[in-house]
Image: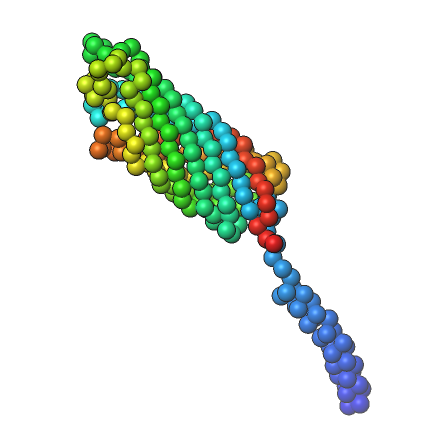
Amino acid sequence: MNVVTRRLSVLLVFAASLFPFSCLHAQVTATAPVTELSQYSQRWDVFGGAQYAHFNPSPNRGVEAINLLGWNGSATVWVRPVWGIEASARGAYGNIVLPAGSGGPNNPPMSEHLFLFGPNFRFLRTPKYTFGMHALFGAAYGKFSTGFPSGETPQQFSIYNDKLAFGAAVGASGDYNLSPKWSVRLITDWQPTYYGYSRQNEFAGAVGIVYKLGSLHK
């Protein structure tokens, strides 16, 4: 009986000696801070790149949609690593294709500029890749009259007249992180505009470079 008692005593002493170490490990695990990846610790990111848009300058089905090329620039201030506020400006340029025999000018130029503002989200954040979405709203200015002779208006040929209208961009973006401060970004947007009191369902895309600066955590 004494042998059993001695063995139990030894086991109890051994178990008691392990208890402080297990508590210390649990405390360290529970209080260890969660750190954000360095790619997402900056307050600002600034994007600049090339823009593409597919746009129909007329409500008339006889006028074909055209491809526009231009530029896209934006800046986002991140309130948290997952969301921020974005301001975007973009311009796109091309030539209108009037129907044959319309009597209008040959391939008159047009331009479109948008100035937008809204929330930006980063749902997936890894060391190399970022996936996000934004919903931007603001103004669009379409200039359609540049190539038309004096005394003629685009509307005479079923083309929208020059107009400042509502515009938006709702879409997704993907970043490939080259370093904590530099990324390559691809953007795809549904870009509705409202020239001529009707909605144009425009597709827009951009590719360019992102530079990140400032500190999100002070």
Residue under the point 43% across and 37% down: 88
Depth check: give the residue in front, 152 or 58.
152
Q: Is residue 55 left or right of residue 77?
A: left
Residue 187: image location, x then y, percent: 45, 34
Q: Residue at x 63, y 65 (%)?
A: 31
Residue 25 is left or right of residue 95, and the answer is: right
Whether residue 192 is visible, yes or no, is no
Q: Position of residue 121 (x, y in %)?
A: 46, 46
Residue 12 to residue 94: above or below: below
In the depicted structure, whether residue 128 falls above or below residue 112: below
Which residue: 22% across, 16% down? Answer: 152
For residue 108, above or below residue 174: above
Instruction: Give me the residue at 33% from left, 33% from top.
Output: 140
| Image location (x, y in percent) of residue 150 | 25, 14
Of residue 184 and residue 73, the one placed in the foreground of this image is 73
Residue 63 seen in this snapshot: yes
- Give percent across and percent down for residue 110: 33, 20
